[in-house]
Amino acid sequence: MASSLWGGRFEKEMDDIVKKYNASIGFDQRMYNEDIDGSIAHVTMLGEQDIISEEEKKVIVEGLEEIRADIKSGKIVFNVDDEDIHMGVESRLIQRIGDVGKKLHTARSRNDQCQVDTKLYVRKEIEEILECLCYLESVILEKAEQYADKIIPGFTHLQHAQPITLGFVFMAYFQMFKRDITRLKDAHERMNYCPLGSCALAGTTLPTNRHRTAELLGFKAPTENAMDSVGDRDYSLEFLSAASISMMHLSRWAEEFVWWNTSEFSYIAIDDSFCTGSSIMPQKKNPDMAELLRGKPGRVYGDLVQLLTVMKGTTSSFNKDYQEDKEAVYDAADTWKASITIFAKMLKNTEFRMDQIGKQMDKGFLNATDIAEHFAKQGIPFREAHSIVGRMVKACENNNCDFEDLTDEQLREIDNRVTKETLGDISIPACVDARVSYGGTAPSEVRRQIAKEKEWMDSL
Ligand code: ARG
């Protein structure tokens, strides 16, 4: 008989390299708290159902709490013989409290146990990440208020497009992270069902109460089908998808930070504490945090693709392949949390250089669309207005001047309906103030958005 907890039918020990290859203790010990919480809920239920005695339950719970304390203090150090966190805890419990410890694994399997641990872990990470995202949103709202009426060039195709407010830019990112928040909340809602007691794949003949363990662990209810319970990794995949999308959002803004921070743009000055220097070029101050934020999605996408690939083509119920689910989740959670926090702090500590931004406002005919809309309001069909302004741009380029410099004659030559007077107020602030359509860039609209989203934040 081999020495493992499952060794009854084995005549030989595992080969050493097999042991190492098979073990997950190296990483899943991260979930020792979740594993012990799951076990305590399980024995509490076993006691209530008279599957074990009240006294046995008490001894097991005390033993588990001692083990928790010893893991925390570093007194217990796991090794490859523990195989995984479930057996690591259980075998130490048996060593510590004797035969009664052997009752812990009644009416459960590692197949449901690893699901309980990972679900509790993902649920905890979701809660922490929601907090990080809410902090980021609060920083964004603060900045959006501060810059609600500050004007900057808006780009499409990285070309000057239309004047917009800086507060409007902040609120655009607010919406992306808001979707990240609601996406995580949806995932939380869908995953919050307890697999404990599904056992290997088919439930148990013992008179368990799965509703009770679900309740004790804060789940909404037990999962409905034991076989699906041990084979489902959708919750981790949803977590990784949400992480990937959110990291993509962060990387997009990080990229804007990188080019806003170039000496050519100089829209922002990132605080020294978020930059690094060069080992050879003494003058350098590089936006490394923004660049790392741009690069980090690579590993998180990798985590998602890894687990999707692990799951692909596996048969229903449990397969050992699924042991490969955890490191992807841990890595994505760590990376995501750190990235949101760094980004929020960097944003808080970035100076927006309105003096530099202001210098860019007269480039690129930012008010061209506003003039065309002005003509449209005077009854000129928009397609014609578009063409008139296009020809005005050409005339300005040929004469190296701005719209305001075109004479009545030049304008009449372009289209006889147009004079300097019909141009109206085409100053940049007037153009921005007038973009009051719902969701538009006008300061009044940005302030409406801020007020609405503040209310939403309060409702969370
Ligand atoms: N260490 C495994 C995991 O993390 C436990 C699953 C049960 N293993 C088994 N051979 N039934 O997924």
Image: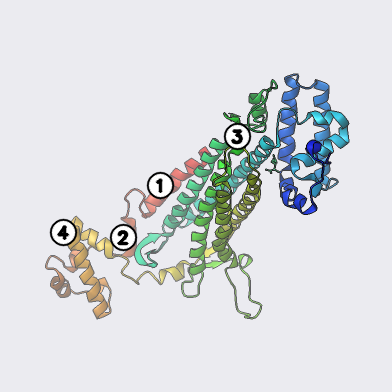
In the rendered view, tell whether residue 335 sits above or below residue 54: below
User: Could you tell me residue 304's position as x and y percent?
Assistant: 56, 51
Depth check: give the residue in front, 150 or 384.
Answer: 384
Tag 3: residue type? Ser
Sequence order check, earlier mark of 4 and 1: 4
Q: Which residue is mark 3?
A: 229
Q: Residue at x 45, y 69 (%)?
A: 355
Callout 1 secondary element: helix
3D distance between C-alphas at marks 2 and 1: 18 Å
Q: Label 2 belongs to which residue?
A: 431
Q: Amino acid at mark 1?
A: Arg
Tell whether label 3 touches label 4 (CB within 8 Å): no
Q: Which mark is residue 433?
A: none
The nearer-to-camera label among 4 and 3 is: 3
Q: As displayed, is residue 67 above or below residue 410? A: above
Report the residue marked by disc 4.
380
Q: Quadrant of the N terminus?
A: top right
Q: What amino acid type is highlighted by mark number 2?
A: Cys
**Cα distance between the residues tagged 3 and 2:** 58 Å
Disc 1 to disc 3, C-alpha distance: 45 Å
* Residue type marked 4: Ile
Give neighbour class at mark 2: few <14, some 14-19, many 20+ (Cα, 10 Å).
many
Q: Secondary structure at mark 4?
A: loop
Residue tagged by mark 1? Answer: 448
**Label 1 crowd bin: few (<14), some (14–19), many (20+), radius 10 Å:** some
The reply to whether callout 4 and callout 2 are in contact (CB within 8 Å) is: no
| SS for callout 3 | helix
Eye-nearest disc, 3 or 2: 3
